[in-house]
Amino acid sequence: MNILVTAVGSELAFSVIKALKLATFPFKLYGSDINAEVAGKYWCDKFYKVPLAKDEAAYIHKLKEIVQSEGINAIIPTNDVEILTLSRYKEEFQNSFNCLIIINPSEEVERFNDKWLSYLWFDENNIPCPKTFLIRDLMSTESNLSGLTFPMILKPRIGGGSRSIFRINSHDDLKKYSIVMPDHVLQEYLYPDHEEYTAGVYRTMKDEVFVIILKRTLKFGMTNTAETVFDSGLENFVRQSILKTKLSGSVNIQFRLTDKGPKVLEINPRFSGTTGIRAHFGFNDVEMSINELIINHKLAQPEIKKGFVLRYFEEQYHFVN
């Protein structure tokens, strides 16, 4: 099995590779990145430097070269731009090179990568979520601001991760930030802070939905500590939410448990930063993807280990003479 993980300088790629290294099938790991020196390069058997995915023609041409020369069986993209770009080439790579790009359909990626489109979809499908506003629309007239209750959260409309997320405590804060971040969305703040959850989901081609739920704390916008949670009500909430979508394979749902029940913060139609953590608890959705889509194994709900994880930073050293 020859597997290519993209953007191996990213936190998400590290998580995916950690999960892969726990898999039971034999494989050779290839990595790619736009930079020549990244930590993930030294986690792979072979590494390639590639163009920016924004330069679509050059990027796709290079990936095709790698796939053909190395006999790549599967590509796992881990960068938002690459995910969106490669979602449009999934069928071509499958038909031309028998190479599976492990990714959801482009229309689903585009919807759930956009927090405003996600909010409209949540609302339409009766999935509880925080009230969300487009900053441009909200700031168009003063009257729109009168009903807001602070604090609120300002987030980029497109993409995931913890970058450019701010807590807005007043109308003055909102006016100040809206000038420099007019394309962001403003979201209702959900309480309590200590009821933050991230759920890993694997939806099979037969619509079986397997779930792991982690209660977590955040640091710098990322999971800092997490513990496995066994709650049939929350698991059912996650399953029913996913079954309303057209998503398949690995999906991540982030939510908070409020006094009115769970409310979805976002759905990520891809592997997530806790993929490696989930794998250590027995829920290896990278392995599940390969087993179902390439090896044709029948899947079952994994047995989740009870426990907790403490996250920390680490470095990759490379000395030269």
Image (cartoon, grey):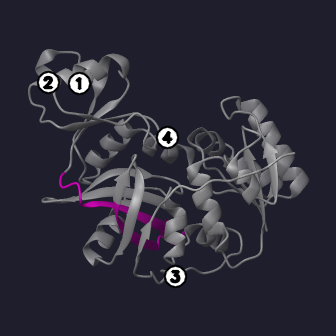
Q: Alpha-carbon distance for marks 4 and 1? A: 27 Å
Query: In what element is the residue under mark 3?
Result: loop
Foreground residue, 187 or 193? 193
The residue identified by callout 1 is 174
For this view, does 63 lie left or right of residue 106? right
Query: In what element is the residue under mark 2?
Result: helix
The residue identified by callout 2 is 145
Asked if marks 1 and 2 touch (Cβ < 8 Å), the reply is yes
Q: Amino acid at mark 3?
A: Ala
Judge depth for marks 2 and 3 and give the one in front.
2
Q: Alpha-carbon distance for marks 3 and 4? A: 29 Å
Earlier in the chain: of badge 3 and badge 4, it is: 4
Answer above or below: position of 214 versus 167. Answer: below
Q: Amino acid at mark 2?
A: Leu
Q: Alpha-carbon distance for marks 2 and 3? A: 49 Å
- Mark number for residue 300? 3
Query: In what element is the residue under mark 4?
Result: helix
Q: Do we see residue 203 in this rendering?
A: no
Q: Alpha-carbon distance for marks 2 and 4? A: 29 Å
Judge depth for marks 2 and 4 and give the one in front.
2
Query: Of helix, strand and loop, which mostly describes the magenta segment?
Result: strand
Answer above or below: position of 168 versus 208. Answer: above
For this view, does 253 lie left or right of residue 67? left
Q: Position of residue 227 (x, y in %)?
A: 37, 71
The residue identified by callout 4 is 110
Report the magenta residues as a range: 191-216
Query: In what element is the residue under mark 1?
Result: helix
Judge depth for marks 1 and 2 and give the one in front.
1
Foreground residue, 38 or 15? 38
